[in-house]
Amino acid sequence: RIANAAELHEQQRADTFTTSGINGATWCRKLHCTQPQAFAEVQGMRTSSRRGRRSLDNTNFEPIDYWRMFITDDMLDDIVCATRVRVIQRTARTPPDFYAARHGAAAWPSRTLRKQEHKPMTKKDLEQFIGIAYGLGVAYKRGIQDAFSDDWLIGVPWVQRVMSFGKFQRLKNSLSVDIPRERNVEHVDPISNRDVSKIGVLMEKFKKRCLHVYQPKAELSYDEQVAKTNTRFSKLQQRLRHKKYNGIQIYSLCEAGSGYLVTFVTRQPTPEFSIEGAMFSLLKDVSDKWHRVYADNLFISTKTLRWCKDNGIYLCGTARTTHGFPAAISRKFGGALEEGEYSWRMTRDGLCAIAWHDSVVTQFMSNWHNPEAIDVIRRREKGQRDRSSRNAPKVAADYNKFMGGVDQLDALRGTYTCRIKAKKWHFSLLWWMLDVAMINAHHVYCVEEEKAKRKPMTRDKFIKSVVESLIAKDEHPDAPEVENDGSGIKRARSETGTKM
């Protein structure tokens, strides 16, 4: 540790100095960067991506075909099977104490459970349920119950033609995504979505579809996002300091400029899980292709920069002095820099550290940028209507341009969301997954339409087309109706029940 400010000032002037610790390195004013490798892939939908079983061959893809690339028939079958198993398990168990006290143990299972058992969920029921959630998320801002209302002012006629409110509630209450894990299958990666209870297997399947369907462009951004939930019963929830709600944190790698989700992992409260380990686990999915990944100072360190370079990944972003940024050129001692000026150092293995005076001194680290490369950015200034141009190091300009991929995905989820209020914490991850599936499907659709030199439809019209296909009744024959066996008859309240 350096003793005083005078010694720090002398160290800053020196051409070469060494930092200690786990992120230590030797820094100098000599250029040790080389020409970056070219990106090894081509952006676009992969030719090997498998469509749903109901997609037609040798025809143009419809919006529903793109959606089924991410939410496949196998995933829907798993949800339907898990839902039916949950209904059977709830019916076979002993009645809860409050139910036995009110109705008697002989009256178990309840009327609702008997309806769920005699009229089990079908795949078409699930698709219509998802279609209603998508459709109401486009333009309807009132509650679900109001959408099923007979009131001509607040009711939604097309929703009432698809199913009744009672059936919608029955499907929602019985819905389960607790898919059992594969037996006798060993997973090498200790950090995986499979370890998330209730919904982990389904999320891991969705992650594989995101990786398999589409090859993103070279620039990617890495950050965390939140699936909002206010329940208190989830071990995964993390309270955000700057928000008034709880949420489940999801570390995500997105395509810069579009918000396409490439891969993700859910934060878990286990000793094996770490921020650095989660980053390495996700970046392995895009290794050896020389992607340009941009991240903020929570994820940038000399260790991660070296690991990425060894695995064929270019990484850069803002940096902290506690993560390896040399303190001699940090913001604490950068007061001598004029606005727009910057100072830099490099290591012999090609890592560069840059302190640039923007409105304040900002710190950057990269494993592939040339610190002497200059670019121009535009900034707003007080008293001026137009933005003024300002010189900046290339790493700062690239960071400002390509860092916002995950934030863009959050913004897209906030506009048209299928999120429905629910008490179960894992439903928040289900709504998050359905929202991201629609965003990814629309982006792949736009890329393919632009390649074919056709004008793609807007996102709201794309969702409308998918909803029309999901709620259609001609794809699956419904299960035969079960005759009324008396389960719909209301029972009289017993004398031991609660009295008003």
Image (cartoon, helix red, strand yellow):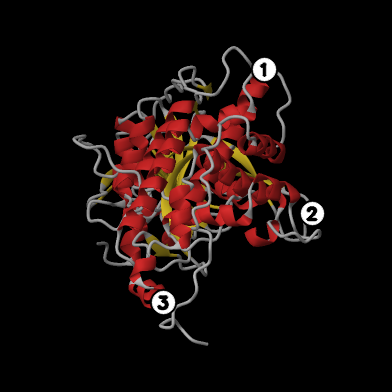
Which residue matches tag 1?
452
Circle 2 residue:
385
Residue at horizontal 50 percent and vertical 27 percent from the top? 214
Q: Quadrant of the N terminus?
A: bottom left
Q: Amino acid at mark 3?
A: Arg
Q: Residues within 10 Å of mark 3 (few under 14, many from 20)?
A: some
Secondary structure at numbered mark 3: helix
Residue drawn at point x = 47 percent, y = 22 percent? 49
Residue at image mark 3: 102
Instruction: Give, as a three-letter code, the residue at label 1.
Output: Ala
Taking the spot 34% from the left edge, 49% from the top edge, the residue there is 14
Q: Are marks 3 and 1 in contact (CB under 8 Å)?
A: no
Callout 2 amino acid: Arg
How many C-alpha atoms fall within 10 Å of the one at disc 1: few (<14), some, or many (≥20)?
A: few
Residue 18 in view? yes
The label nearer to you, 3 versus 1, is 3
What is the distance, in whole Å, between disc 3 and disc 1 at their CAs?
65 Å
x and y percentages locating residue 234 in the rendered image: 37, 62
